[in-house]
Every structure is written in C-alpha cells, then in structure tokens.
C-alpha cells in the first residue's frame, strides 16, 4: 500500500489521536514526515503488519509512548518502559526552573524518584558543570535511567535507595523531585488508562498525597552541606500544603511557579543551617 493512503486510513481510525499516525509510520518505516510527501513509497507487507499491531495496541488504550518505547522531554529522547512514569510536558517547568538556577555553576544535584531520569538527565545535558545523581528504589528503574543518560551522552551517577526507609549517602547542593503525589484514594478514581499502564508506585503519594514531600523535607538537612535548594513538582492544588510543610522544616524563600496552563506546578525553597552561609 502506498504511504499516503495508509496515512489517511490510520488517521481516520485513530480519531482524536490522528496525529499519532505519523509517529507510528515513522517509527516502523524509518521514513521522515517530509519523505511521506517528497519521497512516498509502498509500505512492505512486513511493515504493514507491524504498523497494524501497534495501531491495535493504541486503539486498546495503551499510551503511544509505551508502544514506541520512547518519548521526548525538553527536546531530548528518552526510553520509557512499563517500569517508569511517562515524562509529562508539565514536568518541563520543574526542569527549566532548576536549569535556570544552576546555569554554568558547579552544583551537585540529586534527582529523587528519577524514573526515566528525564529531569536529572535534562539538567546534566544543559548545565555542563552540574554533577547529577539519579535516585530511585529499584534496579529495573535505574537501568532505564542509566540507558537514558547514555542515550543523551551525559554522565550521571545512580543510587538505589528507598527514600521512605533510608537516607542516601552523599552531600548535595540541590534536590529536585517529581515524587508520586496523588492521594491513594483518588488513584482508584483516575482514568483507568493511567493506572492500568503506568506504575502505581510512581503515582501514589499516600493518603493525603504529601507523603514524599514530608519525608524529603525532613531529611533534606542531612543531604545538604550546610545549605541547599529544593525544587519539587506539585499537584495543582498542593501549593499551600507543600509551602507549609517546607516552612515547618525551616525552609525559607518558598516560591510557587505556574506551568504553561497557569496551574501551580513547582515549589522551590532554600534551607540554611546554623551560621554557615554561602553565595546564593
Ligand atoms: N522523575 C520522573 C518524572 O518526572 C518520575 C516521576 C515519578 O515516578 N513520580 O517523570
């Protein structure tokens, strides 16, 4: 079948996700979207069979990112598997905030609950003097994160640690985290496409959704070298609660940032301990 005809058929079938037809065709045939127009060709039977298989999975509700095994975040490519949350466009607000904060400075950054590694790896890629550590609780997740670091040509250390149970070793200047932040009860009411494909562990923030913020704020002092900066992604309605719990742990300069849709999405704060102070 010639590519143009296949493309219109798939677009029709995919309905509101019509734009994904091109990604699927590109993924299987290796052709670019401009090739569809400038250098159209017949799609082979093998390619057609593979495309059909992928489209059927999509029509069953599986997210395209898992079907293709990859996605884009901050203009970079990331591999994703069922072990990791699919990086969200909203999370770019958090990565951008930290990248801007670091610039060319030499900073030790700890990405807690790194998943695919999208946040820490984007920081390592864009801040040449940042030393990034990617932390998560399982080897399977850290394997994906390491592969992504390699794919993007950055070096990043990985640390396996269950942050709820242990305190990782090492000292850092910046902690960044997009932890699980959905209330346990809400998870069961979520669009079941999210919960049937994405790992519950990456979403469940405990009874009030704040379990990880509370824990990280509590232990942050032990991870900093006297002072440090923290940046969290939060749910649109968690700004006040996370601000309060950071203040309770003696954080100052607590600031909320909005995402591109105008929702509260990021909280940043500083912690200074004792008399020790240093530039910014
Ligand atoms: N840090 C990863 C991301 O932002 C994973 C987050 C998570 O699993 N909650 O996509």
Image (tube, rainbow, N blue to C red):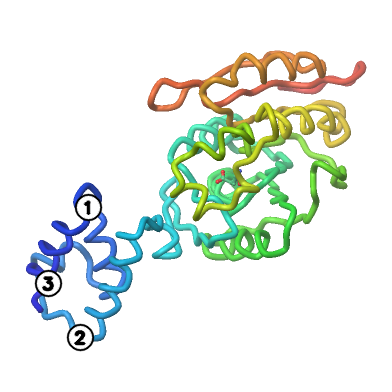
Q: Position of residue 50 (x, y in %)?
A: 30, 77
Q: Residue at the bottom extreme?
A: 45
Q: Nearer the viewer, residue 274 or 231?
A: 231
Q: Which residue is mark 1?
A: 19
- Give the quadrant of residue 247: top right
Residue hosting label 2: 45
Circle 1 residues within 10 Å: few <14, some 14–19, many ≥20: few
Q: Please give the name of the residue rendered at 86% of the width and 44% of the height, measured from the top-left corner.
A: 165
| 131 to 230, vertically: above or below | below
- Closer to the N terminus: mark 1 or mark 3? 3
Quadrant of the drawing holding the C terminus? top right
Tell me, for residue 3, which label it has, or none.
3
Per the image, label 2 sits on a secondary structure element best described as: helix
Q: Nearer the viewer, residue 209 or 248?
A: 209
Residue 217, given in percent of the width and then of the height, sits at 78, 27
| Mark 1 element type | loop
Residue at point 54%, 60% (across, down): 82
Horizontal arrangement in the rendering, residue 164 relative to residue 58 (left or right) = right
- Is any atom of residue 30 visible in this view? no
Q: Position of residue 192 (x, y in %)?
A: 46, 46
As drawn, the residue found furthest toward the right would be 274
**Disc 2/disc 3 C-alpha distance (Å):** 12 Å
Depth check, front residue: 32 or 238? 238
């Amino acid at each position: 079948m010639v590519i143009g005809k296949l493309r219109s058929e798939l677009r029709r079938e995919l309905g509101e996700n019509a734009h994904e037809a091109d990604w699927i065709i590109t993924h299987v045939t290796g052709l670019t979207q401009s090739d569809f127009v400038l250098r159209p060709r017949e799609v082979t039977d093998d390619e057609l069979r593979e495309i059909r298989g992928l489209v059927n999975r999509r029509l069953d509700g599986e997210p395209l990112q898992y079907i293709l095994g990859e996605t884009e975040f901050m203009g970079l490519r990331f591999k994703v598997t069922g072990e990791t949350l699919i990086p969200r466009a909203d999370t770019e607000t958090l990565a951008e905030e930290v990248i801007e904060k670091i610039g060319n400075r030499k900073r030790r950054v700890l990405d807690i609950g790194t998943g695919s590694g999208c946040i820490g790896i984007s920081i390592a890629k864009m801040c040449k003097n940042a030393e990034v550590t990617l932390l998560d609780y399982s080897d399977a997740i850290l394997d994906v994160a390491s592969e992504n670091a390699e794919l993007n040509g950055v070096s990043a250390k990985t640390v396996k640690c269950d942050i709820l149970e242990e305190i990782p070793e090492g000292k850092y200047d910046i902690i960044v985290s997009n932890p699980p932040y959905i209330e346990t009860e809400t998870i069961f009411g979520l669009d079941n496409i999210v919960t049937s494909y994405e790992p519950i562990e990456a979403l469940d923030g405990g009874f009030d959704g704040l379990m990880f913020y509370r824990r990280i704020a509590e232990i942050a002092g032990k991870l900093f070298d006297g002072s440090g900066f923290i940046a969290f992604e939060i749910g649109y309605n968690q700004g006040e609660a996370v601000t309060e719990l950071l203040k309770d742990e003696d954080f100052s300069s607590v600031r909320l940032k909005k995402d591109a849709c105008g929702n509260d999405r990021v909280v940043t704060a500083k912690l200074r301990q004792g008399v020790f102070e240093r530039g910014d």
